[in-house]
Amino acid sequence: MVDTKSPGDKTLSVPTKTLTLKPRVETGTVRQSFSHGRTKQVVVEKRGKRRVGGDAGDAAHAPEPAAVKAAPAKPVLTRPAAAPAPRSGSGVVLRTLTEDERTARASALADAKQRDVEERRLAEEEAKRRNSKEGIEQAEREAAEARRKAEEDRHRQDEEAKRKAEAEAKKRFGEAEAKAAAPARALPTARAPGVAADISDEDDGPRQIRRGPGGVARPAAPPKTTAKPAPAKQRGRLTLVTALNADDVRERSIASFRRRTQRLKGHASNEPKEKLIREVTIPEAITIQELANRMAERAVDVIRLLMKQGQMVKITDVIDADTAQLVAEEMGHTVKRVAASDVEEGLFDIVDDSTDTEPRSPVVTVMGHVDHGKTSLLDALRHANVVSGEAGGITQHIGAYQVTSPESGKKITFIDTPGHAAFTAMRARGAKVTDIVILVVAADDGVMPQTVEAINHAKAAKVPMIVAINKIDKPDAKPERVRTELLQYEVQVESLGGEVVDVEVSAKNKTNLDKLLEMIALQAELLDLKTNAARPAEGTVIEAKLDRGRGPVATVLVQRGTLRVGDIIVAGAEMGRVRALINDQGETIEEAGPSVPVEVLGFNGPPEAGDRMAVVENEARARQVTSYRAHQKRENAAASISGMRGSLEQMMSQLKTTGRKDFPLIVKADVQGSLEAILGSLEKLGTEEVAARILHAGVGGISESDVTLAEGFNAAIIGFNVRAHKEAAAAAKRNGIEIRYYNIIYDLVDDVKKAMSGLLAPTLRETMLGNALILEVFNISKVGKVAGCRVTDGTVERGANVRLIRDNVVVHEGKLSTLKRFKDEVKEVASGQECGMAFENYGDMRVGDVIECYRVETIQRSL
């Protein structure tokens, strides 16, 4: 209320307007309908738009106060913000607003302005969206108009073509035949606006189409018929309400009627279908489901046929190829038998055309006994020092190098093989991939066991041999002795009237090396070595290893074709794509031709040494070959393990009968060749009592998984030229697992042999000490029976083992508990003296019994 005072102290009460932000909302209720006849009363609100003008507009539309309405002669009261209270014409004084009221009014005005700005922004966005939608609709209308015009043009062209065809038919066959040849239902040509055209329809009959002024076809009103309209078919979902209120019977749907018609047609046509004869490819084993799919027959029919033959099978059972062939032929199909090994057909040994071949470098393998100078001779030929990098001066790996002959300028590929007895498989591989074998024999040592083995490998491979008698610079060298000893093994050199070339060389002084190269070149010319370099490459894996930085690395000797970077290769059960090729000098090359040894990077895993390598056309073929080989490898391993497996009772009975003990080992080596040699040597160490059990063998460093496996089986870990990873070494130290490192195969085999010898049961040996005759038996209290004896021969010792013999029969075996001479305990009694003896836990002694005294010695056995 505003208090106003007049000069005559008259008071007028004027109600003031409350400053509030009332929402302009109109509310009402509507009834909303839902499915199944349900409804719901919903309250809705209608918000009015805010009028621009702030409080002025509100004041203009606000109702006047009652006091002001009562005095219409008075002027409208105003409230200036900060002016002094003026006086009106009637003397009414207006009170000024307080600070709080002004602040509230200012904040309300600011909020109203903010809402107005926001509403204007929303209105502009709505207008933009509406304009965009109108543009899209306009574009759609234009596109529809363009499509309609194109359709009209097409119809017009069709009509022109039909009229031309009719005219042509009239000219040829006459009017009657033209009418018969014309289509029964033709679309009318384009007509003038407003002209009606009849279109015959298959179901609905003729109807009229009128074209408006713009050429747009619009359907005319349907013709009036005198028939009564049929009752409308009930549409919508069948609910309880509609079912109760329905006057007509619910009709069958069109889709249901069509399904019934098709079903009746299918039953009516009982004509037998034509039998399709297929060529069925049958592998070595196939499931019934797969066989039925390949024949396009039902699996039930196949099972029924097998049941007639007396076989109760399921759809997932596997049958052999013979049974599958009988089933397929019984059902009228032809059969094509294939084997799983067919995936390897055409992979190797494809005959080259003689017109495409060209000469290649010879492959020479250096073989012989250990420490006869094979690697030194090869170093002298290639001006290198490989032997200095070998542990103990003994070659542990197989190597491949290329040497250029100084006389002819042609290249010769040399393969160096170890001479240790454990590397028999390496020497056999070297003899298989070679063209010429150089047999190195030391002039001061003669023919040794590995020399004889190398001769046998060369004869088995049917390759020519050149004997290099090395170390002729030594004072005790006897080359003639070597030639004579070779005669024992059917090797007759040329100097003794044979066909085998022999050359006396010295790797240390580089004597007669040129002559050796000349003999190799001459032998290669006689062999006439040729191959096709343009075909996909084939080769042999000489060595393989797992490099931590480069991954699986394989040393491959390319024998035929050319190996290039990017080729997809297969070797054994491993495949890959060639990422890099590195020659024997450590240089990266792009391709390797025939007789070139290279290191290949890109295999998925290290292949086994001796595997044949081939280039295939795509990855799918490579996966087929490797999956087949991996499957074969697993089957062979499972077959070998199944022979050792059995029930617990069988294992215990076998342990009782054989008493064989296992020495568990985990072996990791740097390359596949060394691993193969180690496993072969350890296998030879086994006996009937103890044998090495290889839990895991692989190429590469010792990992944490190896340590975990060793912990589970309490096994030792052997590393040959490899080291354990940092985490593996810490785990082994924490769990107390022993890791032994070796770089010479001699030391490895010797240490394992000693460790396995510790598992052997020791040998017990008896040593006779003496005999004593019982003269009298005394029964002493608190002691028991004591025999008074005389030592007849030898000596009797206290604590020794004794036998009580009665009538030449052993009655008791035990130990002496008491040995007295008179009243004193003594350690031993010599022959001819009398003594008293008592046995441990035995007292049945009689006069005349003989006591035999002996000592048992334990002797440790070794392999």
Image (cartoon, rainbow, N blue to C red):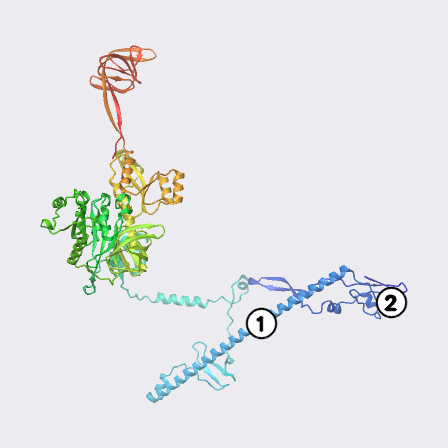
Q: Nearer the viewer, residue 580 or 174?
A: 580
- Residue named by callout 1: 130
Of residues 112 and 409, the one nearer the viewer is: 409
Query: Which of 401/734 is in front?
Result: 401
Q: Position of residue 406 (x, y in %)?
A: 21, 57
Q: Is residue 235 visible?
A: yes
Label 1 element class:
helix
Q: Where is 371 relative to 781, above or below?
A: below
Single out the residue that lies furthest toward the right. 8
Tell me if 162 is positioned left or right of 212 in this view: left
Kindly indicate whether the residue at mark 1 contacts the one at mark 2 (C-beta within 8 angstroms).
Answer: no
CA neighbours of label 1 inside 10 A, class few (<14), some (14 to 19), many (20+): few
Splitting the image into 4 quarters, where does residue 170 fall? bottom left
Q: Is residue 754 above or below residue 557?
A: above
Q: Position of residue 709 (x, y in %)?
A: 36, 42
Q: Which residue is mark 2?
A: 91
Q: Residue furthest left?
A: 497
Q: Quadrant of residue 524?
A: bottom left
